[in-house]
Image (cartoon, rainbow, N blue to C red):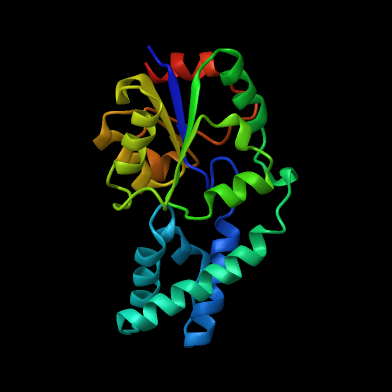
Amino acid sequence: MIKGCIFDLDGVIVDTAKYHYLAWKELADDLGFDFTKSDNEQLKGVSRMHSLDILLKIGNKQFNEETKLKFAENKNKVYLEYIMKMTPGEILPGVIDFLKELKSKKIKIALGSASKNAMTILTQLKLTDYFDTVIDGTNVNKAKPDPEVFLKGAQSLNLKPEECIVFEDAKAGIEAAIKGGFKCVGIGSIDNLGKANYTMQGFYGITFGKIVELIN
């Protein structure tokens, strides 16, 4: 029986990928190479430092750890400037109705995100009251596809993995959910997220009951 739902943040509840892309692209421009939206797909669902490593590999650049930490810090400052301007109007269609339905059915709700800015974003979007627990980049040591973030989310809800559904938009996130023993729903293209129990474009018009029916 499903008793909890664990949500990734970026691309599931809100589209912050565009802000990540703009911040990473600014860094790439400063370093003298092109970073495309297609390249940015590789960064979805992974940690900040791992994302930086991928970006530098794309640009065929190498730096010491101290310099890389400065790059990551500067990227985050640019990203924060974008997200501090976010409003609840940027919440993806259908998300609020879905969260309200979960609350009405007494389904526990967790956030499981690699982002270290998750609480800032939830606060900007006025969504904090919907979540029973938030596990983010400040609580975990291992990046997806390691299932640590979801396992900690389930543990914090006092639930077993098989009692939870994970909602993810990234291949690494789907892999993490499967490794952790969770049912998972992919948000996006079935071409990228085909290993999920079910794939959909978004939450608009979907109900919790329908999701449970489709994943079983």
Which residue is drawn at the image coordinates 64% and 22% (left, top)?
100
**Can residue 195 be seen by looking at this rendering?**
no
- Above or below residue 87? Residue 48 is below
- Above or below residue 44? Residue 78 is below
| Between 14 and 205, the one nearer to me in the picture | 14
| Between 48 and 15, the one nearer to me in the picture | 48
Please count the marks in the image.
0
Q: Position of residue 206 (x, y in %)?
A: 59, 23
Q: Is residue 161 left or right of residue 117?
A: left
Q: Is residue 48 left or right of residue 206?
A: left
Q: Position of residue 93 (x, y in %)?
A: 67, 36
Q: Position of residue 176 (x, y in %)?
A: 31, 41
Which residue is drawn at the image coordinates 66% and 30% (left, top)?
96
* Quarter of the N terminus within the rendering: top left
Examine the image and state in which quarter residue 94 appears. top right
Which residue is drawn at the image coordinates 35% and 84% (left, top)?
61
**Can residue 180 be seen by looking at this rendering?**
yes
Which residue is drawn at the image coordinates 54% and 46% (left, top)?
11
Examine the image and state in which quarter residue 18 appears. bottom right
| Between 208 and 119, the one nearer to me in the picture | 119
* Quarter of the C terminus within the rendering: top left
Q: Position of residue 25 (x, y in %)?
A: 54, 74
